């Protein structure tokens, strides 16, 4: 039993224990111990056991807080020997007037407490557990234990053993909330998501040349005042995209100076993130060519312990042969334990992958009277109906952007297999001379408008078809539908078959695709006469049925 003269020292020591081992956002219950996961994590994959270290007695209450108390060994078999062995291992002596539990409660040195907790957890022989193998798939778990001082262990190898005191009759000491514990790990997962319209997604679609925004999220390990050191490095392997910028950093939901995160490899040549100075046994983290390294060591402070970090990163999507643009991030945490003077690293570093996709639009130009015929040098322009913007295409970088208007949009030519904007002599006679394929587009709905007819075919806009394409880049599917002169558009596998006519007289033969509005537009475009009088109507009839080049 602890001497009552030692009450003040004991109270301060247990308050120190609470401050070191039990910070957290969860409200503590009046009884038992509330465990909470670090920010952004859950307790899934953990299994907790509680061993009683000490009993409370001689509790003195002042108002709503405990002002004094004693801690002594529980009357449970094997407890004294277990506690004594741990104190010896940690090189902590038992002061006069105290027993082993009282000595632990009196200890205020953080490194010594860590050593005691490690030794207690590693002991081959322990007293019977008060509760065993308790689990939760959520952020919180309450261990239903009587009032006292406890060791909490976890089957998860990356979780540190923890010492925590419950409340005393539902009350805490001044300035310290007892009975709560944030589960402390040596490493946490890293996650990356594509951000689309403000929402995080595991996959998505962004066109080549456009900016993609990502969130890289991790939770900093426990960073106490026990002399431990933590290093957190993240490596992002990007395929089919180029790093653009680090736009923002938050810790615990609060913005911090993004310059605290040091970047490596922004020039595309890779490099190395150095091991933090003064951290015995730590190693550097290599960053390969084409990868980006994010060094979070400057954020690893006790104020940020167990808090979630979110990096907002932008990239520019670049062309790939398979329309895949993959991000794979890997987290490299290192944690130095002063109690054992060892630096720990996860055997299998956590990873996360985001699949950003682009897609193709394909069509073939043919003759309305001969579906097998293929026609080169037909021109098409593309409009994104979601934004209403006509599109331009950089033939060198294969990047898409918005045109000022339809007139300045890029015109694509059937037969232009290498998409350089021109038709070579070999392309005009190649098997693909009537085909057009454009790649690197994001999911969406597109208007494809014929703007240049092949030689010998109707060149008026009223005689050239338009169609829409609905592209799902993630699924790799596209559907086509004729719009203006819809009967001139059919589907051939994953491509649209778009016909041209040599004369306006062909239109009725395609299934009555003319509407009254179309006929009127043709009359206005080609007749050039008034709509009154029998003679005028006859001339209109003759003009409308004459062949047009």
Image: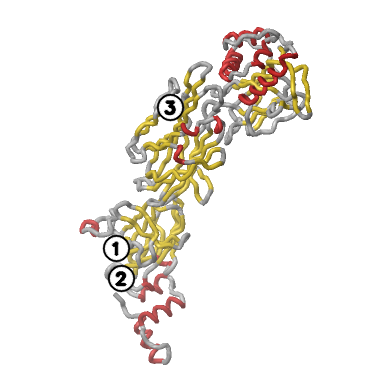
Residue 149 sits in quarter: top right
Q: On residue 457, which mark appears?
A: 2
- Mark 2 to mark 3: distance in Å? 71 Å
Residue at screen point 69% across, 10% down: 98
How much space separates mark 1 and mark 3, taking CA atoms?
65 Å
In the rendered structure, find residue 375 and report the number of the disc placed on it. 1
Helix, strand or loop at disc 2?
A: loop
Name the residue carrying label 3: 276
Pointer 2: residues within 10 angstroms few (<14), some, or many (20+)? many
In primary-sequence order, the first of circles 2 and 3 is 3
Placement of 91 over or under 320, stated as above or below? above
Could you tell me residue 528's position as x and y percent? 36, 85
Can residue 502 be seen in this snapshot? Answer: yes
Q: Could you give the CA–CA distance between mark 1 and mark 2, rounded to whole angstroms?
A: 10 Å
Q: Picture quarter containing residue 527? A: bottom left
Which one is closest to the eye, mark 1 or mark 3?
3
> Looking at the image, which is closer to me, 357 or 186?
186
Q: Nearer the viewer, residue 500 or 67?
A: 67
């Amino acid at each position: 039993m602890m001497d009552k003269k030692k009450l003040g020292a004991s109270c301060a020591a247990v308050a120190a224990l609470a401050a070191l081992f039990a910070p957290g956002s969860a409200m503590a219950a009046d009884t038992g111990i509330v465990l909470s996961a670090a920010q952004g994590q859950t307790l899934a994959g953990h299994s907790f056991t509680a061993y009683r270290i000490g009993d409370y007695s001689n509790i003195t209450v002042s108002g709503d807080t405990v002002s004094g108390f004693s801690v002594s060994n529980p009357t449970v078999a094997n407890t004294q020997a277990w506690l004594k062995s741990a104190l010896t291992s940690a090189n902590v002596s038992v002061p006069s007037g105290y027993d082993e539990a009282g000595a632990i409660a009196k200890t205020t040195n953080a490194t010594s407490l860590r050593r005691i907790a490690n030794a207690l957890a590693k002991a081959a022989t322990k007293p019977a557990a008060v509760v065993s193998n308790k689990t939760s798939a959520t952020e919180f778990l309450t261990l239903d234990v009587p009032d006292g001082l406890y060791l909490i262990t976890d089957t998860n190898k990356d979780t540190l053993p923890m010492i925590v005191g419950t409340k005393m009759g539902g009350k805490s000491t001044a300035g310290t909330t007892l009975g709560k514990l944030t589960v402390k790990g040596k490493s946490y997962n890293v996650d990356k998501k594509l951000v689309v319209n403000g929402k995080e997604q595991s996959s998505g679609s962004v066109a080549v040349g456009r900016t993609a925004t990502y969130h890289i999220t991790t939770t900093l390990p426990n960073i106490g005042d026990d002399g431990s050191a933590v290093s957190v490095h993240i490596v992002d392997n990007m395929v089919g995209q180029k790093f653009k910028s680090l736009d923002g950093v938050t810790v615990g939901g609060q913005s911090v100076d993004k310059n605290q995160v040091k970047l490596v490899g922004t020039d595309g040549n890779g490099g190395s993130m150095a091991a933090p100075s003064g951290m015995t046994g730590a190693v550097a983290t290599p960053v390969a060519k084409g990868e980006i390294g994010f060094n979070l060591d400057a954020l690893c402070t006790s104020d940020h312990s167990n808090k979630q970090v979110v990096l907002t990163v932008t990239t520019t999507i670049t062309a790939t042969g398979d329309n895949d643009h993959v991000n794979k991030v890997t987290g490299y945490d290192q944690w130095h334990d002063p109690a054992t003077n060892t630096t720990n690293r996860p055997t299998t570093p956590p990873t996360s992958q985001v699949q950003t996709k682009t897609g193709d639009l394909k069509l073939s130009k043919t003759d309305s009277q001969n579906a097998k015929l293929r026609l080169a040098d037909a021109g098409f322009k593309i409009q994104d109906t979601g934004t209403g913007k006509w599109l331009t295409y950089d033939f060198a970088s294969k990047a898409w952007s918005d045109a000022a208007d339809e007139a300045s949009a890029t015109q694509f030519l059937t037969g232009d297999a290498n998409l350089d904007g021109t038709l070579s002599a070999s392309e005009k006679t190649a098997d693909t001379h009537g085909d057009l394929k454009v790649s690197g587009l994001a999911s969406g709905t597109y208007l494809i408008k014929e703007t240049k007819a092949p030689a010998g075919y109707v060149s008026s806009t009223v005689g050239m078809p338009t169609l829409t394409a609905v592209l799902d880049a993630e699924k790799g599917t596209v559907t086509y539908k004729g719009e203006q002169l819809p009967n001139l558009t059919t589907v051939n596998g994953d491509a649209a078959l778009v016909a041209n006519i040599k004369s306006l007289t062909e239109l009725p033969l395609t299934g009555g695709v003319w509407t009254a509005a179309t006929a009127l537009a043709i009359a206005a475009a080609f007749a050039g006469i008034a709509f009154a009088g029998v003679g005028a109507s006859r001339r209109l009839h003759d003009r409308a049925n004459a062949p047009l080049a």
